[in-house]
Amino acid sequence: MKVRYFSLLILFIFLSCSKEKRSDKAFGNMQDFVIHISNYAHELNSDFIIIPQNGIELAFNDQDPANGLNLAYLNAIDGVGVEELFYNGDYALDAERLSMLQQVKQSKKVLVSEYVNNDAFISDAYIQNEVKSFICFTRTSQNYDYIQIPDTIPNENNLNIMQLSQAQNYLYLIGPDETQFPSKEAYIAAISSTNYDVILIDLFFNDEELSATDINQLKTKANGGSRLVISYINIGAAEKDRYYWKSGWRLLHPLLIKRKYEGYDREYWVRFWKSNWQEIIYGNDDSYMKKILNAGFDGAYLDNVEAYYFLYYKD
């Protein structure tokens, strides 16, 4: 009995170490992936903005703030985005991430998306972030999936926003409510009528790719000031509703489709280091990033960069 227990213990330790090694390698692969996406975009547009969302550990060496900032990664990005820093329904400060963001904000813009379950928390969510020099977008339960344009814009202004560092607010709208926006024209008009400094939207509206003409319309605020228009792109998970999804794809077919994305039935975590996934994302004329660049976006918002964690650590 003792021999069997000892053997199982050794197996557990081996599997745990193996999982940790794979995760560490995936962590480095994601750093490289973001850097390569940035390099590709800058070859075509030297002013193109790169903002990874979540996975703030990627800004540090070996996932550990004690080991210092990873300068190659920081030099490839212009800002970082995070979700639920001070609020996740109720007030729920993530002190560990805040500490890391305090270091990163010295050279990069920090965009925070808060989720509040009570309208009474909205004002405090903005205040908490402004005190830390972060720009904030706050959404309620009705807008959990970023489908609506809020009525209030914090720090509204008529300045010309030419660089991300100048932004004082932003709109996050990636799954537009079809009842509010029954057509692409209505969608473009609604965004155009706002004074947000940064517009973060999807490349597509109801599977229709936005054109350079569409994006150019959005680059001026209603009050006449210039603003930045950034495209959302999911680089760590495959989405069944995207143009690249092929008939017959499912879990482990192809092998890059690694794991179900809990809470999102139509998404899968991917082995993002595989060449067939990276070719979908960047590096050629048919790639997702090339479509974003062709449409005239000012930058890209890279979602699910924390895939390295969910592939191996999250159970």
Image (spheres, grey):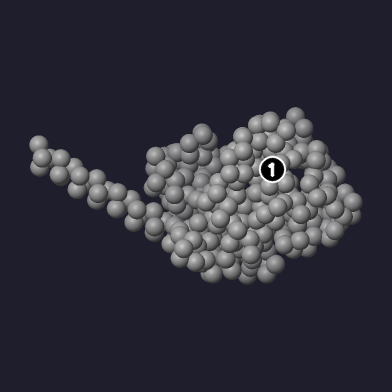
In terms of secondary structure, where does tag 1 sit?
A: helix
User: Which residue is label 1 attached to?
Assistant: 125
Looking at the image, residue 210 sits to the left or right of residue 260; the answer is right
Residue at 74 percent across and 49 percent down: it is 170
Query: Where's residue 36, x and y in %?
Result: 53, 65
Query: Where's residue 104, x and y in %?
Result: 59, 61
User: Could you say which is closer to the camera, residue 199 or residue 92?
Assistant: 92
Q: In what quadrant of the picture does the C terminus appear?
A: top left
Whether residue 96 can be seen here: yes
Whether residue 209 can be seen here: no
User: Could you say which is closer to the camera, residue 7 or residue 89?
Assistant: 89
Looking at the image, residue 312 sits to the left or right of residue 95; the answer is left
Query: Where's residue 272, x and y in %?
Result: 46, 53
Query: Where's residue 29, x and y in %?
Result: 45, 60
Quadrant in which residue 123 is drawn: top right
Q: In what quadrant of the picture does the N terminus appear?
A: top left
Residue at 70 percent across and 56 percent down: it is 133
User: Could you say which is closer to the camera, residue 25 or residue 296?
Assistant: 25
Q: Is residue 162 above or below residue 264?
A: below
For the image shown, how many numbered marks are present on the structure?
1
Residue at 54 percent across and 69 percent down: it is 71
The amino acid sitting under disc 1 is: Ala
Quadrant in which residue 180 is drawn: top right
Residue at 65 percent across and 49 percent down: it is 112
Q: Residues within 10 Å of mark 1 (few under 14, many from 20)?
A: many
